[in-house]
Image (spheres, rainbow, N blue to C red):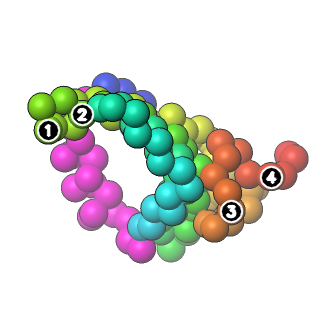
Amino acid sequence: PGRRMGVDGALEVFRFWRDHFSDTRIHIHALIIEGNRFSVEYQYATTKDETGVRTASGTVSTGYVEDGKLRVWKEYLDGRVSRLQASGELPVDEFAEPFPWPDVEL
């Protein structure tokens, strides 16, 4: 998150998530495949073990597969959503249609 990374960096992120978060769910809303390119719109929800706080935000990932391997995975999300949910300023609706921002005004 917030940087480019290769396989080792991705594994580091996944291991961190495994060790610090639980009940992680991904709710896929749309999946588009065109040749070797893809785009996935989904709602990502998880609970931070240290605080017990659950957050959920919509995101979109896009990329491509080459020679049977995932070569590029780009993820677009607004990190403010989970921070504002954790502070209680935004609602958490894990099953809402994924948008970059919840349906509320601040």
88 over 31 or under it: above or below: below
What's the distance in space between the residues labelled 1 and 4, CA to CA? 39 Å
Q: From the image, tell me which residue sits under label 1.
A: 68
What's the distance in space between the residues labelled 3 and 2, CA to CA? 29 Å
Q: Earlier in the sequence, mark 4 or mark 3?
A: 3
Instruction: From the top left corner, tell me how far across and down residue 67 is, in percent.
Output: 12, 31
Residue 59 image label = none
Q: Residue 15 colored magenta?
A: yes
- Amino acid at pointer 2: Val
Dividing the picture into quadrants, the one containing residue 78 is top right
- Within 10 angstroms of label 4, few (less than 14), some, or many (20 or more) residues? few
Tag 3, which secondary structure? loop
What's the distance in space between the residues labelled 3 and 1, CA to CA? 33 Å
Q: Determine the residue positioned at 80% across, 52% down.
A: 103
- Within 10 angstroms of label 3, few (less than 14), some, or many (20 or more) residues? some
Looking at the image, residue 54 sits to the left or right of residue 88; the answer is left
Q: From the image, tell me which residue sits under label 2.
A: 65
Q: Determine the residue positioned at 27% across, 64% down.
A: 19
Q: Determine the residue positioned at 21% across, 46% down.
A: 12
Q: Disc 1 or disc 4, which is closer to the eye? A: 1
Q: Are marks 3 and 2 in contact (CB under 8 Å)?
A: no
- Amino acid at pointer 3: Ala
- Amino acid at pointer 4: Asp
Q: How many marks?
A: 4
Q: Disc 4 or disc 2, which is closer to the eye? A: 2
Q: Disc 3 or disc 2, which is closer to the eye? A: 2
Span highlighted in magenta in the image: 5-23
Q: From the image, tell me which residue sits under label 3.
A: 96
Taken as a whole, is the magenta stretch helix, strand or loop? helix
Q: Are marks 4 and 3 in contact (CB under 8 Å)?
A: yes
Looking at the image, residue 43 sits to the left or right of residue 104; the answer is left
What's the distance in space between the residues labelled 4 and 2, CA to CA? 34 Å
